Every structure is written in C-alpha cells, then in structure tokens.
Amino acid sequence: MSDPGGSDQKSFIEIGVPAVQVFTGAHADYHQAGDTADKIDGPGLVKVAAVTRELVAYLAERDQAVDLDARARRRRRARHRPRASAACRSAPIPDYAFAGPGVRITGTTPGSPPRRRA
C-alpha cells in the first residue's frame, strides 16, 4: 500500500488552502478499490472527531491568528536552521498499514532533496 501524497487534503494544499488529514489508521485496502464502508473504524472515528473538535476550538479561541504565510515560515526556518548533520534529507512516505514496531517506509516523495555528501 502506498499513498504518495494522494490523500484528500492534497488538492487543497496545491491551491494554497491549509489542510490536514485526520484518520483512524490504515489497513491493507486503504486508498484502494477494496476500501469499502464496512472497514470504517467507528470507535476510532469518534476519537478523531473529539480531537479535531478540540483542535478547532483551540484555534478559534486564540488571540492571534495562526501565521500561514509561506514567506514568514521561510524566514523563521532560516533563523532556526538545524545543523547540516541533523537536517532531514528526504521526505519519507510511511506504510500506514504496517502494524509492527517502528515505522516502515514505502518510499520517498518525488523531488525531495537528495542527501548531501560531506
């Protein structure tokens, strides 16, 4: 199973609308033709809805708006840039259906920066 950025929020992000994906977890048919309604995790959906409600309430009650300006984010990153040895060099795609210990990576996002040689 892989989802190289094809989730529902992608179309919003591509046109500059902030978006986030919340879900209860994945299974072998996640984002596949066999992903049918009987695979919906009802109790998990209730938890996701509760957390999402808390997040929306928190954001709505803030005195200051969340800064979503891309230039401001780049300026902040430039001021707090990590050391080269600690910087991320790829955009890994996790296997959301993997139930074992740790995180299994199914690939990297096309166009992610290559690892720099020391």
Image: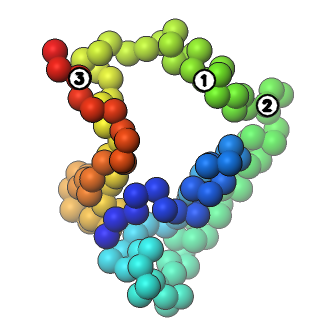
Asked if disc 3 and disc 1 are in contact, CB closer than 8 Å, the reply is no
Res 73 label: 1
Asked if disc 1 and disc 2 are in contact, CB closer than 8 Å, the reply is no
- Categorize mark 1 by other alpha carbons within 10 Å: few (<14), some (14-19), many (20+): few
Name the residue nearer the viewer: 44 or 105. 105
In primary-sequence order, the first of circles 1 and 2 is 2
Q: Is residue 8 left or right of residue 114?
A: right
Q: Position of residue 96 (x, y in %)?
A: 35, 62
Please name the residue shown 68% across and 43% down the image. 16
In primary-sequence order, the first of circles 2 and 3 is 2
Between marks 2 and 3, how big is the CA–CA gap? 37 Å
| Above or below, 26 relative to 22 | below
- Please state which amino acid type lies under the numbered disc 3: Arg
Provide the secondary structure element on which disc 3 rests. Answer: loop
Q: Position of residue 37 (x, y in %)?
A: 53, 88
Q: Is residue 105 left or right of residue 58?
A: left
Residue that badge 3 annotates: 116
- Categorize mark 3 by other alpha carbons within 10 Å: few (<14), some (14-19), many (20+): few
Residue 84 sits in quarter? top left
Residue that badge 2 annotates: 65
- Please state which amino acid type lies under the numbered disc 2: Ala
The quarter of the picture where the N terminus appears is bottom left
- Please state which amino acid type lies under the numbered disc 1: Arg
Please name the residue shown 46% across and 56% down the image. 5
